[in-house]
Amino acid sequence: PGDKSLSIRWILISSISNGISKAKNLLISEDVLAAINAVRALGVKVILKNNLCKIHGVGLKGYKYKKGLIINAQNSGTLGRLIPGLLIDAPVAIKIIGDKSLSNRDFKRITIPLTKFGASFKLKNNFGLPLTLKGSNKLKPIKYYEKKGSAQCKSSIIFGGMRTEGTTIIKAKKSR
């Protein structure tokens, strides 16, 4: 059976890859479906049929950003915290929303390091969702020490680093 965290990460990585990625036994849960809907909103073709998921990756620079774009992470902390790293170069403001439970979780742990790349963020009560981000076309790599041992935070920073020219360095506490 599929794993939720790995399934979401696979969807995000496949969306920015070149060509078609295929997964069998992907976990089909509400969180994973939210990730599929998120990349679809960014112009990525996803085919989910029977036991197989195919994602037609658009490459690192292939997302389509529409004005007024809203991504609903529903209850997925993994999606809500990882996708901003992929969006720090967005030329338009993007809003990320979630359900009541997700909206009350800490998102500063990812917006603080992602701001260092050059993107800007607005959080509800300076803490949670909804989150509005505005990317930059002048992103720069960063050096970041992640103190919480958060795999979500590290993954978001890795995605952000992929959007820059140069080398991003992350030193972090051990996480799963």
Image (cartoon, rainbow, N blue to C red):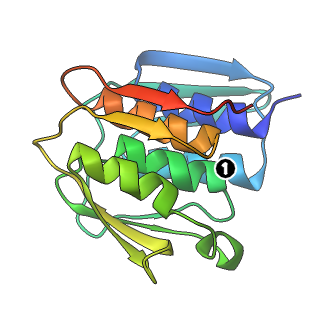
**Residue 37 visible (yes or no):** no
Image coordinates for residue 66, horizontal then vertical, percent: 25, 58
- Where is 145 relative to 168, above or below? below
Question: According to the image, label 1 marks what residue?
Answer: 33
Relative to residue 103, is residue 109 drawn left or right? Answer: left
The front one of 55 and 75 is 75
**Secondary structure beneath disc 1?**
helix
Specify the quadrant that holds the C terminus: top right
Say if 22 sits above or below 13 in the image: above
Residue sitting at x 63%, y 76%: 104
Q: How many marks?
A: 1
Q: Amino acid at mark 1?
A: Leu
Res 161 quadrant in image = top left
Location of residue 62 in the rendering, given as x and y in whole percent from the top left corner: 27, 33
Identify the residue at horizontal 29%, vertical 53% (top origin). Answer: 115
* Relative image position of residue 152 (x, y in whole percent): 59, 43
- Residue 31, compared with residue 176, is above or below; it is below
